[in-house]
């Protein structure tokens, strides 16, 4: 009998082989995970990839090793109770929303990750939105904000806006806040928690990008110490732990902990990876044993890097509240974020975390070594010199194989739009659940102005929806989306991966 797979095997690239090849290249990761492929205690995972055998406890009924590991994590972060998450912060977000807002309304920051919207849908909630402050170059901000990024950035959510929303809206069961944001902007969690608790409801903070907060004076305070009832941290984003590893912390008596554990049991796999749990426990041990040393070295390297960036002439390199989030803007040169990321990747073999609008985000962590910071600083200084020289040699200051400028007709409607990455107020016509479950039809994206979307559209990363099912597509947003598509950005959330069609409500 012949091989049942004979004739089916094609010459393809296998993921494992490609990872091995990439590992052996010299690309430097200024992106997550925070171990940066060099710092961490987990080696040769196949040899200890087990199931729930005797003596190794069970995540869903933790009484021994895993319970003690979770207690160590709680102690490090100052939480009353901490749970391991083996499918990232997503599982924690879904569990927190399900436990705290099983019905009614959820007051949530509009720049939340898509997982929060999925929690709204699953629980058939009505979302009431908190819109972050829009940063502009003339605003009084906590950090130096470059003029070319004016209007591109989401700032913090203000406590007074939370108070006003809670006073106005009945049936709000919980508040969901994102702090820090993907770009490193924090809201005043302590002040917001005080307002939320006046209404005897819990505050959930998606602090996925802030697991390193509170570990050193150079970084902001941790949300778990600021009065939040549930805080969700992605260890893998900014600390030396494997991808998918996260923590959920609980404080106070406003959260039904029995229901929360039930939700965690529902949203997490019944076969949790011991490799991932061991990675979390090793990360906690590393921080307990030598966290002071690691973070002091990290802070010193960051300070040195920021000092080197002070005299750039064409690039604008800065950070928001979190100094480990490196924002690189080339707006003064006319480059888009994607073009700038391409130069860093192809010319300097530096892989950034994200490109959006006219800037690039690079993530630094305790896993970065002196070589990494040196390579990034050298690349940015050299690129800045080239930009400066070209700007004085030619009226065309674009460099090295960039796309041709948009034609005049397209430019008129989209040149400004593609730079706008902040979250605007879309008209809400129905709940997410009503839209997701309602009658829909497919339409060309260009023809969707004033129609109610039946799908999400977001750039990934960071996964913050630009439009949500049930929201009306306004002209400005449509131009923004078309401009992103024109410039090669990947719009996700749509059923059509080619980004030509959007499902709209058949009304």
Image: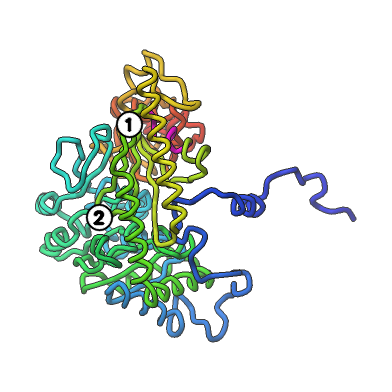
Q: Secondary structure at mark 2?
A: strand
- Magenta stretch contains residue 336: yes
| As drawn, 245 above or below 142 | below
Mark-to-mark CA distance, 2 and 1: 30 Å
- The residue tagged 1 is 331
Is residue 469 among what the camera can see?
Answer: no
> Residue at the spot x=24%, y=52% of the render?
321
> Residue at the spot x=23%, y=33% of the render?
147
> Residue at the spot x=31%, y=49% of the render?
306
- Magenta stretch contains residue 411: no
The boundaries of the magenta stretch are 335-342
Chief secondary structure of the magenta portion = helix
- The residue tagged 2 is 177
Label located before the other in sequence (2 or 1) = 2
Name the image quarter holding the C terminus.
top left
Q: Residue furthest right?
A: 1
Numbered circle sitting on residue 360: none
Locate residue 259 relative to residue 24 in the image: left or right: left
Q: Position of residue 444 (x, y in %)?
A: 44, 25
Which of pointers 2 and 1 indicates the residue nearer the eye?
A: 1
- The part of the image, by quadrant, that contains residue 423 is top left
Q: Residues within 10 Å of mark 2 (few under 14, many from 20)?
A: many
Q: Position of residue 163 (x, y in %)?
A: 11, 54
> Residue at the spot x=36%, y=29% of the render?
388
Q: Position of residue 145 (x, y in %)?
A: 22, 40
Q: Residues at badges 2 and 1 in contact (C-beta under 8 Å)?
A: no
Q: Secondary structure at mark 1?
A: helix
């Amino acid at each position: 009998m012949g091989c049942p797979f004979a004739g089916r095997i094609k010459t393809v690239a296998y993921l494992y082989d490609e990872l091995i090849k990439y590992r052996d290249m010299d690309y430097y990761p200024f992106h997550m995970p925070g171990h940066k492929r060099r710092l961490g205690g987990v080696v040769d995972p196949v040899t200890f990839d087990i199931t729930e055998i005797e003596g190794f406890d069970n995540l869903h009924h933790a009484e021994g090793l895993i319970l003690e590991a979770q207690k160590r994590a709680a102690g490090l972060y100052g939480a009353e109770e901490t749970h391991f998450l083996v499918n990232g912060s997503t599982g924690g977000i879904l569990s927190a929303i399900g436990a705290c807002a099983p019905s009614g309304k959820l007051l949530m920051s509009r720049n939340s990750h898509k997982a929060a919207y999925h929690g709204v849908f699953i629980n058939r909630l009505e979302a009431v939105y908190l819109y972050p402050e829009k940063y502009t170059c003339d605003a009084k901000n906590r950090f130096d904000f470059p003029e070319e990024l004016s209007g591109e950035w989401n700032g913090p959510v203000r406590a007074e806006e939370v108070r006003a929303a809670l006073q106005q809206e009945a049936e709000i069961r919980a508040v969901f806040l994102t702090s820090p944001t993907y770009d490193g902007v924090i809201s005043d969690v302590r002040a917001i928690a005080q307002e939320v608790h006046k209404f005897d409801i819990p505050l959930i903070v998606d602090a996925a990008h802030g697991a390193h907060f509170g570990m050193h004076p150079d970084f902001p305070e941790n949300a778990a110490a600021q009065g939040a009832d549930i805080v969700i941290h992605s260890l893998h984003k900014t600390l030396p732990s494997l991808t998918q590893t996260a923590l959920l912390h609980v404080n106070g008596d406003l959260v039904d902990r029995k229901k929360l554990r039930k939700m965690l049991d529902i949203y997490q796999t019944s076969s949790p990876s011991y490799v991932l749990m061991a990675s979390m426990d090793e990360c906690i041990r590393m921080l307990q044993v030598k966290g002071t040393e690691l973070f002091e070295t990290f802070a010193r390297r960051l300070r040195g890097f920021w000092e080197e960036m002070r005299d750039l002439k064409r690039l604008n390199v800065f950070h928001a509240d979190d100094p480990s989030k490196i924002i690189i803007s080339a707006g003064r040169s006319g480059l888009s974020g994607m073009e700038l990321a391409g130069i860093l990747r192809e010319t300097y073999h530096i892989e950034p975390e994200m490109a959006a609008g006219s800037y690039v985000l690079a993530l630094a962590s305790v896993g970065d070594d002196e070589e990494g910071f040196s390579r990034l600083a050298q690349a940015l200084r050299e690129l800045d010199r080239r930009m400066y020289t070209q700007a004085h040699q030619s009226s065309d200051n674009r460099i090295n194989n960039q796309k041709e400028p948009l034609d005049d007709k397209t430019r008129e409607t989209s040149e400004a739009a593609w730079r706008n990455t902040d979250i605007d107020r879309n008209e809400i016509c129905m709940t997410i659940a009503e839209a997701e479950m309602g009658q829909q039809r497919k339409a060309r994206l260009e023809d969707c102005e004033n129609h109610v979307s039946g799908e999400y559209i977001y750039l990934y990363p960071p996964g913050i929806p630009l439009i949500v099912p049930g929201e009306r597509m306004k002209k400005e947003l449509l131009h923004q989306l078309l401009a992103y598509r024109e410039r090669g950005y990947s719009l996700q959330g749509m059923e059509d991966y080619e980004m030509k069609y959007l499902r709209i409500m058949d009304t």
